[in-house]
Amino acid sequence: MIESIDHIGIAVESIDVSRAFWENLGLAVERIEEVPHEGVRVAMIRCGGSWIELLEPLGPESPIARFLAKRGPGIHHLCLASSDVVSDDTRLRAAGYRLLREAPTRGAGGCWVQFVHPHSAGGVLLELSQPDAGDAGGEG
């Protein structure tokens, strides 16, 4: 079940350069991590009850590198917090929506994640994310 907006993902060429803008607004990068299987380095910035996620490609074949080459820096996706990403996945599939992965997988922070194709979500790449609370039934 969807609970809230978790974060907005923003594709950037460099976290080190981009973070200065957010810090000048009075926000702080709380953590930076690499997610090698996604080809991305992420910086998480708390903004009220949600996050801003800066996404930097780890290499030229990264999905974020391809996004930047095609569209330039900017909003990449919207993420909704889920209490049960597996049930959300099942419900959306049953209703005929297009999901990008066969099953939820691990994402940044160890969360279970699934992505909904923009064609199924009004032109927005939508991520569903559930914090790890043991085994959510996805890949690990």
Image (cartoon, helix red, strand yellow):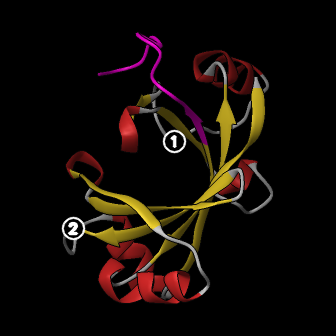
From the top left corner, tell me how far across and down residue 119 is, in percent.
71, 55
Determine the secondary structure under disc 2. Answer: loop
Predominant secondary structure, magenta span: loop
In the figure, is residue 38 to the left or right of 85?
left
Residue 87 at x, y percent in the picture: 66, 15
In-front residue for pair 65/100: 65
Q: Which residues, given as a range, are shown in magenta?
A: 128-140
Residue 101 placement (x, y as % from top left): 46, 35
Q: Quadrant of residue 32?
A: bottom left
Q: Which residue type does callout 2 highlight?
A: Leu
Where, quadrant-wise, is the N terminus in this rendering? top right
Tag shown at residue 58: 2
138 within the magenta span: yes
Q: Name the quadrant containing residue 48.
A: bottom right
Give above or below for 74 relative to 56: below
- Badge 2 crowding class, 10 Å Cα cut-off, few under 14, some 14 to 19, many 20 or more, is some
Q: Residues within 10 Å of mark 1 (few under 14, many from 20)?
A: some
Q: Is residue 50 magenta?
A: no
Q: Position of residue 26 (x, y in %)?
A: 59, 80
Residue at x 19% of width, y 71% of height? 59
Q: Which of 63 and 16 lies nearest the eye of the viewer? A: 16
Is residue 48 toward the left or the right of residue 10 in the image? Answer: right
Q: Quadrant of the C terminus?
A: top left
Location of residue 58 with respect to 70 vertically, above or below: above
Q: Residue 7's mark?
A: none
Q: Secondary structure at mark 1?
A: loop
Of labels 1 and 2, earlier in sequence is: 2
Identify residue type, mark 1. Leu
Residue 107 in sight: no
Residue 100: give its label: 1
| CA separation in Å, label 1 and label 2 | 21 Å
The answer to whether residue 101 is above or below residue 29 is above
